[in-house]
Image (tube, helix red, strand yellow):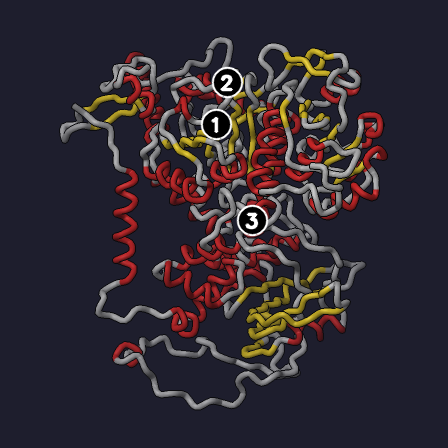
């Protein structure tokens, strides 16, 4: 834990098992918007959180174009990603995944929201170092019994994104070892 | 080939499937294309469900596999053995003990919980396929939510037969948007899809599609105001456990065509017969 | 008292035991050796490699043995194995012009540089059962012709038409083709993807479709410009070395057809192309592939849609894979008690309604 971070360290100790558990945490978060789960196993160089590092290890590889927002675009993190997931780093418009702090990910209209024929061809935003103590908003939609609540950095971008449904990007929030998610299907109100 | 990766599939393949599952969750009822792999069992035997289960299992899971509601049907046995061998997970026949349930053609009678994932094997994921065989055309239909063709077909049924003459794989509308094929479950099971606390994942291997229902998603069986959907079953009670509310198999018992009705869900029936219910 | 049927597991074990005994046949007969299958049933091996999309004659022979001679089952075994193999990289495109041909015929020119080579073909055999093969399995050894395996300078026949501008250009787009086995099929499919699907498509399905084009369902007047079978070298670019190295050799069958020309008042008439390329000595498949490829190109060549099956890419690509087809076809023998019960109830109810009404 206290060993110095290198590009070679911070991967999964048992890739098959750790990615399986990591995926279940992401699935749980995405399937139940507003629920905060635990996510660990991966460790990358600052500023990436353990949860976000784990998300990258679980979902990204050389077939998934990744955008690093300025907050996370450091040589150390680039190296770590090159070694552990080999995800090609791309511009926002070409990204399947985008990683950064909320402010650094702006403006959001640069990200793919899919097409009417293929709404799945949309970006997943990994909003790192999320403030889980920010004001909580009301959520409803698939995955939510009646109503859920989640701290969000802003409201309007999520309302606008949901208005495009079934198009839109999907968001994963990470900080420390915590994870939550807000798919485009969720209405913020 | 003595050494398999956990749950058989390689990590690249599992990542690809996991990404597809997440997009399916984000757009409930939309069929996400995925690069289905050739599995060591034939297409049609549940390769879509098997790939989802393989990408979803964690070592701590307790797996139940049913076919036609029963744990002991040959293909259920075969799939269960596959995961015992390749993932080393614990298996069970009890619905209440399972964390992941892979199914073909049924939803268990015992209500599912939020701690469970139900994985369906799907032969033809496209609900419009029998009205429009072309993928290029059905893709357009879903893009525009132009489901008039389906409404017309259902209405023609009513005109001709006095009711909608679809008894299984009865189409549903998901979260007010996509029309979805619930796999060939009897329409008796359709109400269980709605507001279900479990995550429901659907895999069609040969057709290379994955789709999903997050927990508590609104799922409505298509119908008309003057011909509302009804979930029907054989009008009998189970000859073994006496249940009057479970879906029944008809069994021919003698050469004269004598018959009886028993629960299709063998775990539900056995628990009731033991008086555990 | 009725007891629900149990014993699925025991039934499976018993079936597998029976299969094992049936597979071996009578113990007094010698067991088949996979080397014998590889060398003496080489055309079956070729088909399994072509449709299995894996070049490995030894594994194809093993699959044929394990499948008891059911070639589709053997292809399935190879496909299921293939999908587990890691992808280390992609080879350079093979140069079929440099093929060491063992068979090479052109139906369009009587004589060609490099000559016509009949090679090991059934073409002019009389199809009379040779009972000597049954009596003791041996035929007198044929004297070697001396022509076998010699490298041959044999430029592509269509190159001569191309040089005069008589046939359409087939420039290399330089694009990396999609990989059907790693990405879901997307329709409409470009030619590279179509050819990929046809190369591993069921031989019988393609044969029927190709035949239908000859009989008038999207006829495209195909001449076999050249059919060649032989070994080509496979090379792979190694970035660390900065050049390509030879990694092996594969036997291929290549068929290039010269088809109905196109042209207009402003555009000079030109022949068009159909193309087939398959693993092993599989010429029926390669010719069929070329005809179907050509039929599928109607749109880009500005031809009329005749509504023929061979012109419909979605129809052809969705149904040409015999592993998909056989799986779905055969799955209807699995239990369908539940959905059939639902249908039974429905039919009873509808009949009751009819009786009430009458």
Contact flag, marks 1 and 3 (Cβ < 8 Å): no
Distance CA(mark 1)–CA(mark 3): 32 Å
Mark 1 or mark 2: whose residue is earlier in sequence: 1
Which chain does tag 1 point to?
B
Helix, strand or loop under label 3? helix
**Are the residues flagged by discs 3 and 2 from a single subunit?**
no
Comparing labels 3 and 2, the label whose residue is closer to the camera: 2
Q: CA distance from mark 1 to mark 2?
A: 10 Å
Residue C283 is situated, as x and y percent measured from the top left of the image, at: 51, 68
Dot 1: what SS? strand
Chain letter belonging to callout 3: C
Badge 1 and badge 3 both on one subunit: no
Q: Nearer the viewer, residue C207 or B47?
A: B47
Q: Which residue is mark 3?
A: C317
Q: Quadrant of residue A77?
A: top right
* Contact check, label 1 and label 2, Cβ < 8 Å: yes
Which residue position is annotated with label 1? B118
Category of crowding for the residue at label 2, using alpha-carbon neighbours closer than 10 angstroms: few (below 14), some (14–19), many (at least 20) = many
Residue drawn at x 73%, y 38% is A44
Mark 2 sits on what residue?
Answer: B196
Residue B167 visible, this orientation = no
């Amino acid at each position: 834990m206290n060993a110095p971070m290198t590009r070679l360290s911070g991967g999964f100790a048992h890739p098959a098992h750790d990615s399986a558990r990591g995926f279940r945490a992401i699935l749980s978060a995405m399937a139940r918007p507003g629920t905060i789960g635990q996510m660990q196993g991966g460790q990358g160089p600052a500023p990436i959180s353990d949860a976000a590092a784990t998300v990258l290890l679980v979902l990204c590889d050389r077939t998934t174009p990744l955008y690093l927002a300025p907050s996370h675009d450091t040589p150390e993190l680039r190296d770590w990603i090159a070694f552990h997931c080999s995800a090609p780093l791309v511009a926002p418009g070409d990204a399947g995944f985008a990683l950064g702090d909320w402010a650094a990910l702006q403006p959001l209209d640069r990200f793919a929201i899919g097409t009417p024929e293929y709404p799945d061809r949309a970006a997943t935003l990994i909003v790192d170092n999320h403030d889980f103590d920010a004001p909580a908003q009301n959520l409803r939609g698939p995955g939510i019994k009646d109503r859920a609540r989640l701290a969000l950095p802003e409201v309007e971008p999520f309302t606008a994104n949901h208005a495009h449904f079934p198009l839109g990007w999907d968001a994963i929030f990470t900080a420390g070892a915590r994870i939550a998610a807000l798919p485009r299907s969720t209405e913020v109100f | 080939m003595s050494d398999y990766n956990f749950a058989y599939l390689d990590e690249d393949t599992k990542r690809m499937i996991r990404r597809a599952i997440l997009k399916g969750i984000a757009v409930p009822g939309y069929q996400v294309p995925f690069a289905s792999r050739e599995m060591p069992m034939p297409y049609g035997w549940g390769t879509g469900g098997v790939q989802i289960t393989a990408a979803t299992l964690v070592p701590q899971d307790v797996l139940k596999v049913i076919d036609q509601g029963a744990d002991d049907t040959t293909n259920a046995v075969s799939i269960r053995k596959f995961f015992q061998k390749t993932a080393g997970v614990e298996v069970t026949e009890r619905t209440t003990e399972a964390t992941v349930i892979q199914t073909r053609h049924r939803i268990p009678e015992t209500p599912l919980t939020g701690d469970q994932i139900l994985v369906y094997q799907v032969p033809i994921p496209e609900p419009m396929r029998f009205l429009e065989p072309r993928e290029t055309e059905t893709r357009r239909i879903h893009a525009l939510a132009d489901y008039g063709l389906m409404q017309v077909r259902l209405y023609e049924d009513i005109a001709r037969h006095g009711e909608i003459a679809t008894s299984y794989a009865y189409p549903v509308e998901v979260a007010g948007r996509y029309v979805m094929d619930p796999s060939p479950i009897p329409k008796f099971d359709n109400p269980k899809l709605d507001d279900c606390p479990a995550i429901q994942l659907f895999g069609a291997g040969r057709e290379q599609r994955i789709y999903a229902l997050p927990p508590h998603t609104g799922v409505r069986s298509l119908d008309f105001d003057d011909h509302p959907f009804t979930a029907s079953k054989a009008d009998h009670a189970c000859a073994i456990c006496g249940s009057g509310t479970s879906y029944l198999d008809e069994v021919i018992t003698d050469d004269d065509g004598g018959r009886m009705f028993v629960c299709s869900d063998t775990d539900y029936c056995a628990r009731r017969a033991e008086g555990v219910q | 008292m009725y007891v629900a049927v149990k014993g699925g597991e025991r039934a499976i074990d018993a079936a597998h035991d029976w299969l094992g005994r049936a597979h071996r046949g009578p113990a007094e007969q010698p067991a088949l050796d996979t080397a014998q299958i590889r060398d003496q049933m080489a055309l079956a091996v070729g088909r399994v490699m072509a449709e299995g999309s894996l070049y490995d004659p030894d594994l194809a022979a093993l699959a044929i043995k394990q499948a008891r001679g059911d070639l589709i089952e053997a292809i399935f075994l190879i496909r299921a194995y293939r999908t587990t193999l890691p992808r280390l990289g992609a080879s350079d495109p093979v140069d079929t012009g440099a093929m060491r041909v063992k068979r090479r015929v052109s139906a369009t020119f009587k004589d060609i540089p490099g000559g016509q080579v009949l090679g090991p073909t059934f073409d002019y055999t009389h199809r009379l059962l040779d009972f000597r093969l049954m009596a003791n399995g041996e035929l007198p050894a044929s004297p070697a012709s001396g022509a076998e395996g010699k490298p041959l300078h044999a430029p592509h026949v269509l190159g001569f038409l191309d040089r005069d501008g008589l046939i359409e250009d087939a420039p290399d787009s330089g694009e990396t083709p999609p990989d059907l086995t790693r990405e879901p099929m997307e329709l409409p499919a470009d030619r590279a993807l179509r050819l990929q699907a046809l190369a591993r498509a069921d031989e019988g399905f393609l044969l029927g479709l190709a035949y239908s084009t000859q009989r008038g369902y999207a006829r495209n007047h195909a001449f076999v410009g050249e059919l060649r079978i032989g070994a080509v070298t496979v090379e792979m670019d190694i970035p660390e070395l900065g050049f390509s190295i030879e990694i092996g050799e594969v036997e291929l069958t290549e068929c290039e057809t010269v088809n109905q020309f196109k042209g207009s008042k402003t555009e000079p008439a030109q022949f068009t192309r159909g193309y087939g390329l398959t693993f092993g000595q599989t010429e029926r498949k390669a010719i069929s592939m070329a005809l179907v490829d050509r039929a599928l190109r109607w749109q880009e060549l500005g031809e009329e849609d005749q509504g023929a099956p061979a012109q419909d890419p979605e129809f052809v690509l969705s149904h040409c894979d015999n592993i998909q087809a056989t799986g779905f076809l055969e799955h209807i023998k699995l239990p369908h008690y539940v959905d059939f019960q639902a249908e039974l109830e429905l039919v009873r109810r509808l009949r009751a309604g009819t009786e009430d009404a009458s």
